[in-house]
Image (cartoon, rainbow, N blue to C red):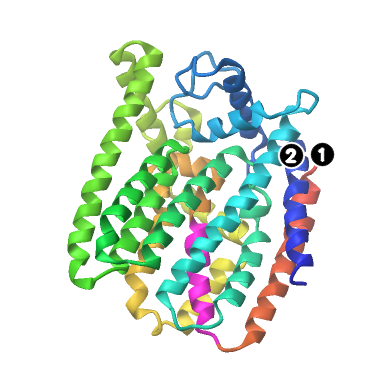
Amino acid sequence: MKRVFPSVLIGLILLWSQLYERTQWHWLGDALLSRWLHYSGEWFAQNGLRSYGLPMYPNLQVAYTHITGGPDWIQAVVAAIRPTSSPIFPWHALITAILSIAVFFWAFSSLKTIARAIFPSEPNLEEVASSVALLALSCASVQVFSAQPYAAGTLVADAVNLAFVASWCRNPDSSRWPRALALFSFSIFFSFWMGLSPVTSSAFWCMASAYRFGAPELRRRRVIQIAAAFAVTAIACVTLKILQNYLYFGSMEAVWKDMVEILRLRQGIGSTETIVQDYSFAKHLFKMAWRIPYLFGAIPFLVLFFGWKNRRTFVEEKTFLLLILLGGFSWQFAMRHHSFHHIYLFRFLMFPLCLVLTLQLMKEDSSNILRRIKWLSALQLLLLWSVALIPAIR
């Protein structure tokens, strides 16, 4: 089972990348948005930077300015290597899924480094991390959305950020702090341009690791420095975004008008769009209630169960763990309408939940628990495919 089951999981991810074009529902991968990003990637491959890096989507008269274009730029690379005989959607979906799988394992190796830094004396990390990885691979967040271009771009941003966090956690020496601070700032910059939405989650991860790791007497100084660095990075990113829009529109009046509309739309206030008029906080909570179990399967329930069972074990880690979990939710509040509409923006919870569950299981003695979790992975995979995915194919 050690080799066969992971191979089956990866094979099913690749299979779904070739099937979800035939679905219509947003929660099954959003084939419509995927086509838009494939189109944008093909446009970049043919036209270069004529739009100054702004995404170009079908049926729109102008470039799309409401988001940064990192995921579209990844699709441009995919388009550039596409054989002329290969259909656009299957090719982009397959290569994107392969990229997501590789990035997932890279990010998980960083999670193991962070877990080892928190509990250095626990001997069962490898076995626990393998079990949690199987659980994550078998849930909809990975099975369904690995081939989705925007979700893949945000996953890349998460993995880059976790690599920098792991680098600091591995050796939090005060002499390495200036380097870590520079890497954290770059991570915020990268997250901003990789679809914008990863930026708040990345900030919480960096802030939490700066708080948790390193000399305790320098903690306040590190937090102040990292907050100042993030502020400078955010100003630089917004300035570059305004410049990008100005180069495209040709006037600051058009830029400011567009930016005001972006903020009103993403926050769900004052826009005439029907989708914003339908927004309510109650509906948002309802979507959270079913999206989290759908995306992450048994993981959040296991986190709650072991969290209550071992509630006294993690008292010293509560600040760090609460910060990264809050980071997973942060985009839901920062851009509530954007999160309300797009299910895959809940995926920022995946790595915080996986790390918390890994730490919890490292404190469990019984190998029977890990064996049951592996069987639980198989069960939730079977339920996902039999109840949700296969019936949706047309």
The relative height of residue 205 versus residue 301 in the rendered view (above or below) is above
Front residue of 166 and 312 = 166
Quadrant of the rendering where the N terminus is positioned: bottom right
Residue 296 percent across, percent down from the top left: 59, 60
In which quarter of the view is residue 365 placed? bottom right
Q: Which residue is under mark 2?
A: 23
Q: Where is residue 254 in the image (x, y as percent from the top left)?
A: 34, 14
Pointer 1 residue: 394
Along the line of sight, the residue nearer the viewer: 257 or 121: 121
Q: Is residue 224 visible?
A: yes
Q: Quick check: 229 left or right of 202?
A: left
Q: Which residue is drawn at 47% across and 62% down?
A: 352
Q: Is mark 2 on a helix, strand or loop?
A: loop
- In terms of secondary structure, what is the magenta stretch mainly? helix
The stretch of residues the image draws in magenta is 349-364
* Residue shown at 60% from the left, 31% from the top: 77
The reply to whether residue 147 is in sight is no
Q: Are marks 1 and 2 in contact (CB under 8 Å)?
A: yes
Q: Which residue lies furthest to the top in this view?
A: 250
Q: Which amino acid does label 2 sit on?
A: Thr
- Lower position in the chain sequence, tag 1 or tag 2: 2
Looking at the picture, which amino acid does disc 1 mark? Answer: Arg
Dot 1 falls on a residue whose secondary structure is loop
Which quadrant is home to the C terminus?
top right
Residue in the picture at 52% in, 46% down: 156
Q: Mark 2 packing: few (<14 Cα in 10 Å), some, or many (20+)?
A: some
Q: Position of residue 326 (x, y in %)?
A: 38, 59
